[in-house]
Image (cartoon, rainbow, N blue to C red):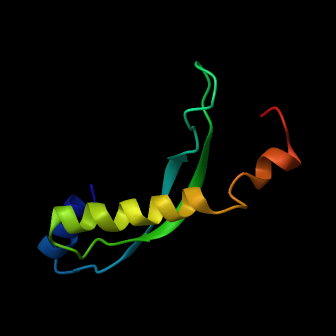
Amino acid sequence: MLGAFRRYHTAFGWPLDQMPMAIPISLRDSSDPMGGNRFTGARFVAPVGEPDPVARIQLVREFILNVRAEPAIAFLDLLHPGV
């Protein structure tokens, strides 16, 4: 999708290097029960200008891994348990 945004904007003469986006991030791990889901949303600066899809995917992957490792990521669970 990021590659498509890059090509679209370049075609209209507005090349982008970065673009603000939001992404859902799964917080489930192997200890979670079957049938449930745990996720959070995160905003980030997407690397739209990276032309290499492998490098672009790696940049997004690194962001997601960093977010998942953030100790405060599940703070909303403390504010409103059961949601």
Q: Quadrant of the N terminus?
A: bottom left
Q: Position of residue 66 (x, y in %)?
A: 52, 65
How many discs appear?
0
Q: Is residue 5 toward the left or the right of residue 82 in the image?
A: left
Residue 6: quarter of image:
bottom left
The residue depicted at 60 percent of the width and 31 percent of the height is: 37
Left or right side of 50 for 28? right
The structure residue drawn at horizontal position 85% and vertical position 48%, both measured from the top left corner, is 78
Asked whether 48 or 54 is in front, the reply is 54
Looking at the image, which residue sits at the far top?
Answer: 35
Image: 31 above or below 49: above
32 sits to left or right of 7: right
Quarter occupied by residue 58: bottom left
Q: Quadrant of residue 47?
A: bottom left
Q: Quadrant of the C terminus?
A: top right
Looking at the image, residue 79 sits to the left or right of residue 30; the answer is right
63 or 9: nearer the eye?
A: 63
Q: Is residue 29 above or below residue 45?
A: above
Q: Nearer the viewer, residue 15 or 32?
A: 32
Q: How far across and down, in percent of the image, does residue 68 sit? A: 56, 56
Residue 55, compared with residue 73, is above or below; it is below
Please provide percent x and percent y for residue 14: 23, 80
Q: Position of residue 62 (x, y in %)?
A: 41, 65
